[in-house]
């Protein structure tokens, strides 16, 4: 499959999984020695052997690695070998593969689909957001005979990347959560982003199914002719195939809504997640459930069990227990910023709300407008204080001041240390603090400081 040369032909153990980082290597994993910008996996072969790897796929045998009891498969390109092996593994899988992409909500929707399908049988899902040309193959190579479903998240930064991931994973079902401004830096416009996401459409077989957001129907129209399978639309509009009505948001406790299929109520859904935006993610998951024949009761039961990875609208408290911290530091774009501010508003009823907001990256021509929009929304929500982090964060501050927020309530910081220091001065018992920014800003450092102090 990988067109390599095996060194050590006797008693080679069968791999139980795959790994590219010895820090997360489990006994029995096949280690792929990839060369990156900062390090080279070939330097860690001895560590892989010591941790119980079943063998390694390498580009060469290092001179200082003389062990003869550790299988090495020497290939021209270990990355390509990883992907080729994943393609071979996918061909052996007879279950259903569900691919999830979109500008926002991918990980949450994936987790919701996972929770739903567990009502039917064993499910494998993308770990955290391993959603690229390395992470997706690693997910596929974790398949076990008992799995009936696999839910994979697909990220992208440019045209052609979703297409490439589909060629590896060959999905039966697909979900596009929404079309937003994320990655506009590389793609240039929402229309190009829609084109990139729509690469998923042509890969779905006639016997599969497609889930699309009703709000993006006009934007996706140029690619609808590529659909070969049944398609279902979701959204708040009652003309969508699956829609939500009578939404009740209850802050940290989550939310509820009535789920309708073609204007007929099929279930009362209760989500243990905050934020009105999660209604859309739940609708996307329920629409996949409809394609796969889940009942209203199964959807209700599954969605009630949803759990999200860390740093996504994660409610924490300071050591005293008197200040609530909303940790949403995994990533950020204008849409998710506005959703997080809505959660802050709901959680801070009758209390002081403080927003600690950082740079949002990869917005291209929308960079200034997107940051100004968030700043205006801060003023609209009536936050007691706005603290921004980074150069782009200063544009958020500018937007808030231009919208009429008192300059005395707006503070711009160059880094997380400054932001935490200022927070420690102004916070009071009863405050609710939202911390959010793009991954590169590492604003979880602020959350750690708040929770410890």
Image (spheres, rainbow, N blue to C red):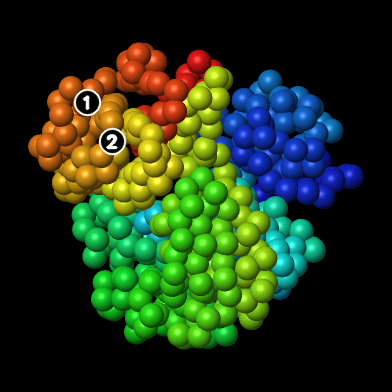
Find residue 294 and report its horizontal and vertical position in percent.
65, 77
Who comes first in sequence, dot 2 or dot 1?
Answer: 2
Q: Is residue 115 left or right of residue 404?
A: right
- Of all residues, the one furthest to the right in this rendering is 11
Q: Measured from the top left, where is residue 397 in percent x and y?
A: 19, 32
Q: Is residue 442 above or below residue 419?
A: below
Local crowd size for mark 2, using a 10 Å CA cut-off: few (<14), some (14–19), many (≥20): many
Q: Is residue 162 visible?
A: no
In contact (CB < 8 Å): disc 2 and disc 1: yes
Residue in the image at 27% along x and 54% along y: 181
* Element assignment for label 1: helix
Mark-to-mark CA distance, 2 and 1: 9 Å
Q: Quadrant of the N terminus?
A: bottom right
Q: Between 324 and 40, which is closer to the camera in this rendering?
A: 324
| Residue for badge 2 | 383
Residue appearing at x 56%, y 58% in the figure: 271
394 left or right of 116 in image: left
Where 67 falls versus 239 (above or below)?
above
Residue under label 1: 409
Q: Residues within 10 Å of mark 1 (few under 14, many from 20)?
A: some
The residue at the point 31 percent across, 65 percent down is 194
């Amino acid at each position: 499959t990988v067109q390599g040369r095996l060194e050590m032909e006797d008693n080679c153990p069968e791999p139980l999984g795959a790994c590219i980082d010895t820090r997360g290597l489990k006994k029995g994993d096949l280690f792929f020695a990839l060369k990156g910008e900062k390090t080279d996996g070939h330097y860690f072969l001895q560590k892989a052997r010591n941790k119980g790897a079943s063998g390694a796929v390498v580009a060469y045998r290092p001179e200082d690695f003389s062990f003869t009891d550790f299988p090495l498969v020497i290939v021209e390109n270990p990355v390509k070998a990883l992907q080729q092996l994943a393609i071979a593994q996918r061909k052996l899988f007879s279950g259903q593969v569900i691919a999830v992409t979109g500008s926002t909500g991918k990980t949450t929707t994936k987790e919701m689909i996972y929770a739903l399908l567990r009502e039917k049988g064993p499910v494998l899902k993308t770990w955290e957001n391993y959603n690229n040309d390395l992470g997706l193959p690693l997910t596929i190579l974790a398949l076990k005979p008992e799995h009936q479903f696999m839910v994979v998240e697909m990220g992208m930064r440019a045209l052609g990347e979703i297409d490439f991931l589909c060629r590896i994973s060959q999905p039966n079902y697909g979900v596009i959560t929404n079309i937003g401004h994320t990655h506009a830096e590389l793609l240039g416009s929402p229309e190009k982003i829609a084109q990139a996401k729509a690469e998923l459409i042509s890969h779905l077989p006639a016997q599969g199914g497609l889930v699309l957001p009703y709000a993006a129907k006009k934007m996706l129209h140029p690619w609808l002719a590529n659909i070969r399978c049944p398609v279902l639309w979701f959204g708040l509009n009652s003309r969508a195939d699956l829609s939500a009505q009578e939404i009740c948001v209850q802050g940290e406790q989550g939310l509820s809504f009535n789920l309708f299929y073609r204007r007929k109520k099929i279930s009362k859904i209760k989500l243990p997640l905050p934020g009105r935006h999660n209604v859309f993610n739940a609708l996307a998951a329920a629409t996949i459930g409809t394609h796969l024949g889940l009942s209203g009761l199964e959807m209700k039961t599954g969605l009630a069990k949803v759990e999200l990875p860390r740093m996504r609208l994660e409610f924490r408290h300071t050591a005293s227990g008197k200040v609530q911290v909303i940790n949403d530091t995994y990533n950020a774009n204008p849409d998710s910023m506005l959703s997080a501010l809505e959660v802050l508003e709901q959680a801070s009823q009758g209390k002081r709300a403080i927003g600690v907001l950082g740079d949002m990256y990869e917005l291209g021509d929308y960079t200034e407008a997107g940051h100004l929009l968030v700043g205006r929304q801060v003023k609209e929500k009536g936050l007691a204080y706005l603290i921004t982090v980074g150069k782009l964060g200063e544009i958020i501050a500018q937007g808030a001041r231009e919208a009429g927020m008192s300059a005395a309530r707006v503070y711009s910081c160059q880094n997380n240390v400054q932001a935490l220091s200022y927070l420690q001065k102004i916070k009071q018992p009863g405050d609710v603090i939202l911390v959010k920014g793009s991954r590169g800003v590492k604003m979880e450092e602020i959350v750690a400081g708040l929770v410890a102090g």
